[in-house]
Image (cartoon, rainbow, N blue to C red):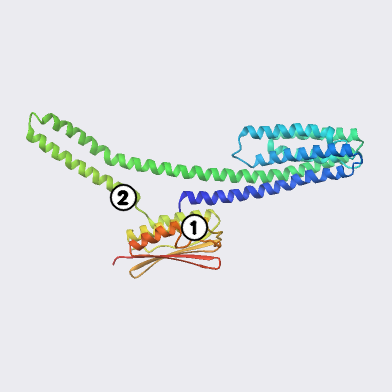
Amino acid sequence: MTQEAAGTWADRRLRRARAATLFSLATGIWASLLLPLVGIAREPDPARAALGAVGVVAFTASQAAVLYAAVTPWLAQRWRRRAQWCLGVVALLTVPLVGPVAAGAWPTWAWLGASLIGMAPLLLRLPAALVISVVTLVATVGVALWTGGQVWRFLAVTGGVGAGVALVNGLQVWFWDLLVEARAGQAAQARLATAEERLRFARDVHDVLGHSLTVIALKSELAARLVEVDAERAGREATEVQGLAISALAEVREAVHGYRAVDLGDQLAAVAGVLRSCGVRCTLVPPPADLPPTAASDLAAVLREAGTNVLRHSRAGWCRIEIVREGDLARMTVTNDGAEERVPDARSSGLRGLADRLGAAGGRLHVRRDEDVFTLEATVPVPA
């Protein structure tokens, strides 16, 4: 399982969560558009109704831009500020445009005031949101007195409905912010793990080469000084330098080999952990203890590709990974549900490369699909 695959799955889920949040917020936008249109439909003066419609549409467009920015973390801050200022200006203009519409018959502007109160907690900190809410309530009282409407009715719509909208919108955006922070935490954790592994490898190489190179440098300097004084001893020092260089090279190769060595049990635990973190129930049958390193390395490569395919090419709810030894063969079976219609097959690039690798080692790779259940089976020879 690669970090890229896990990130792809997480980003896909984040996009779906964002789409669901936008859809939910859009229902509030429709309410702020449709309910004032009721007042416009009841306005007998065509000119006043037209001006009111312009104000309502402009307010709805500004509201949509602000809510879109609230759940778009990659949007530049200056665009958020511009959208908020635009909404503030349009809200002020709606007082003379929408306020007189259906005067005394329908609290047209009160519904826009409810939308303002509902959005205030999403855009501002609590003290500023409370100030905006109080100003909006004062404005709705002023519009009611100006147009001859019932003050209590305006306050009930602006204050009561606005508080409900603020609660619903606040919970939605709060959950969205939690998802964004969790994704950022996963990315930071992956970067930290990579940095720690690089540091560990650098430390190992330094420990291996530091002493050897220091001795080589000193003996080379000594040999150079002895060339004209004691040629025989200089030759011995040069021979020792050569031996030290060969030994250092062997130690570096040993370190790199250890760095690249694969622990199949650790790989199995890592893949299962990623799958479970993505909501996939994972059942494991651990590998036998006597599996040779060569076979474990080949199966680990297949395991990583299989885990990637579960995330990229399915909507799996469960996955079962089983590794057994059958005589002179080691067999790994990865089965998952939720397979899409277009699933990876033996001709896909990742699986084709694995099939070639297993074939060179005398193994075999086989895939099959039964309805929405996808099975990948790999076998590798185990030396006696």
Disc nearest the viewer among 1 and 2? 1
Q: Please identify the residue farthest to the bottom as the structure is shown.
A: 327
Vertical arrangement, residue 102 with respect to residue 337, above or below: above
Is residue 222 visible in this depiction of the protein?
Answer: yes
* Secondary-structure class at tag 1: helix
Nearest the eye: 301 or 178: 301
Name the residue type under label 2: His
User: Which quarter of the figure has residue 162?
Assistant: top right
Instruction: Compare marks 1 and 2 and give the one earlier in the sequence.
Output: 2
Report the number of discs. 2
Label 2 sits on residue: 257
Amino acid type shown at disc 1: Asn
Is residue 209 shown left or right of residue 79? Answer: left
Front residue of 50/178: it is: 50
Q: Quadrant of the C terminus?
A: bottom left
Q: x and y percent of residue 261 in the render?
A: 34, 52
Residue 370: x, y in percent?
Answer: 53, 69
One can see residue 284 in this view? no
Quadrant position of the N terminus in the picture: bottom left
- Out of 25 and 280, give the one closest to the viewer: 25
Q: Is residue 354 left or right of residue 189?
A: left
Crowd around label 2: few <14 · some 14–19 · many ≥20 (10 Å): few
Asked whether disc 1 touches disc 2, contact meaning CB atoms under 8 Å apart, the reply is no
CA–CA distance in space, label 1 to label 2: 28 Å
Give the residue at x 35% y 50%: 260
Q: Mark 1 = which residue?
A: 309
Q: Where is residue 276? Give x, y as percent.
A: 52, 56
Based on the displayed image, in which of its 4 quarters is residue 234 positioned? top left
Expressed as whole percent of the image width and height from the top left, the position of residue 165 reads: 75, 44
Residue depicted at x 61% and y 38%? 75
Check disc 2 and report its element: helix, strand or loop: helix
